[in-house]
Image (cartoon, rainbow, N blue to C red):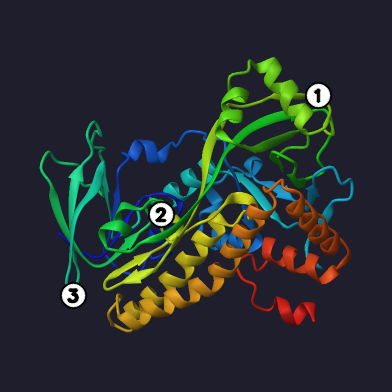
Amino acid sequence: MTFDLAIIGAGPSGLSMARALADSGLRIALVEQQIAAALADPPFDGREIALSLRTLRALRESGVFDHIPPDQVFPLEQAVVFNGDDPRPMRVSPLRGKTQLGALVPNHHIRRAVWAAVQGQRGLTLFDGNRVGALHPDASGVDIELLPVANAAPSPGETTAAASPAPLSIRARLLIAADSRFSETRRKMGIGADTHDFGKVMLVCRMQHEQPHHHTAWEWFGFGQTVALLPLSEHLSSVVLTLPQHEMDALLALGDADFERDIARRYQGRLGEMKRAGSRHTYALVGVYAQRFVAPRFALIGDAAVGMHPVTAHGFNFGLHGVELLSREILAAARAGGDIAAPERLRRYEAAHRRATLPLYLATQAIATLYTDDRSPARLVRQLVLGASSRFGPLRLAIATALSEEGLSLRGLLPRMA
């Protein structure tokens, strides 16, 4: 079976790439370890995704936004950043002419919406319940061995190729990896990644609270912990708490009443009484940046290229940016009757995506490192940085721009600041 391109990973980035190439006439193979039923109805995982205005616009243009329930899109109008016990936070407001920085949407609704958007798409074949085995690239394409995942039942559907007991081989002119920040496909193609383990665990849990949040996100760099608040409906938020593993284990062992009191204490009672309104979920904090985004007949997108620390909320926004850049090159080549994996096109994608992501990736690493360091010198620097940010309007403008309309790049900010 021969395809124009194969996408490994049917998460939001992989599915968004497939959607971006709809009506192109290209034959696309989509390979995913989960079965189709799991992709169609992903479970709630506690994560609320901050979408920039640019990302929201892209989701509307692709038709994905039509599949997200309106009552699951929560406006993000302001952001405040606290440092320790300093009562004077840095405040970030929307750009002039805008009413919000972006919006929050539950991750499982995004996954469900992108899946719904590609249903019935011509030229798209799903190989669910399969993982990638051996890869054999050559000058004209890549031979891809697919191995059935144990206990993954095949799913019905005209555009679905069921997992078989024996390995299956497909061939594609271009192979795209979108299989997480720990991408096996990236490793099989010989591309390394710079990985930073922050040594912390992040808890996410929805909580009801007495006081309203006014659609304001909080980032609170306390001493010994980092606390965030993602505003949903007026008295409902997703609390985000970062702790060392042993402290997180003790918190998770608490019953509901003690857990609720502990969370309210960590927020210093600013939201009044707090009650758990959802399940608790934890995630290890690891940042990943691939050493290369492309190789002959191969490209990385999504977290396989850039896996961000969530402190600046750029993960999915970066993923869609990579999809936009790479799909633009592929579509241009297809319209011209050229090679969709031409080296110059892949290099152009890599250069553009690296320019957009590397400065913010490094800045995020620095922020996350500085603001989780509780030693006295770091505390002083934190206070100076936030104090300067609060007084220096252009820096707040730069942050608002990164959070909202531009959402992806530091380009253009220096002239504005000047």
Q: Sort mark 1 into few (<14), some (14-19) or many (20+) by Cα contacts within 10 Å.
A: some
| Residue 213 locus on image (x, y percent) | 81, 40
Q: Are marks 3 and 1 in contact (CB under 8 Å)?
A: no
* Quadrant occupied by the C terminus: bottom right
Residue 337, located in which quarter of the rendered image? bottom left
- Total labels: the figure holds 3
Seen at 35% across and 51% down, the residue is 9
Dot 1 falls on a residue whose secondary structure is loop
| Residue 96 locus on image (x, y percent) | 81, 68
On screen, residue 37 versus residue 111, left or right, reads left
Q: Nearer the viewer, mark 3 or mark 1?
A: 1
| Residue 30 locus on image (x, y percent) | 30, 54
Of the residues under marks 3 and 1, which one precedes in the sequence? 3
Q: Which residue is mark 1?
A: 273
Q: Which residue is mark 2?
A: 15
Numbered label attached to residue 140: 3
Numbered label attached to residue 2: none
Dot 3 falls on a residue whose secondary structure is loop
Of the residues under marks 2 and 1, which one precedes in the sequence? 2
Is residue 99 visible in the rendered image? The answer is: no
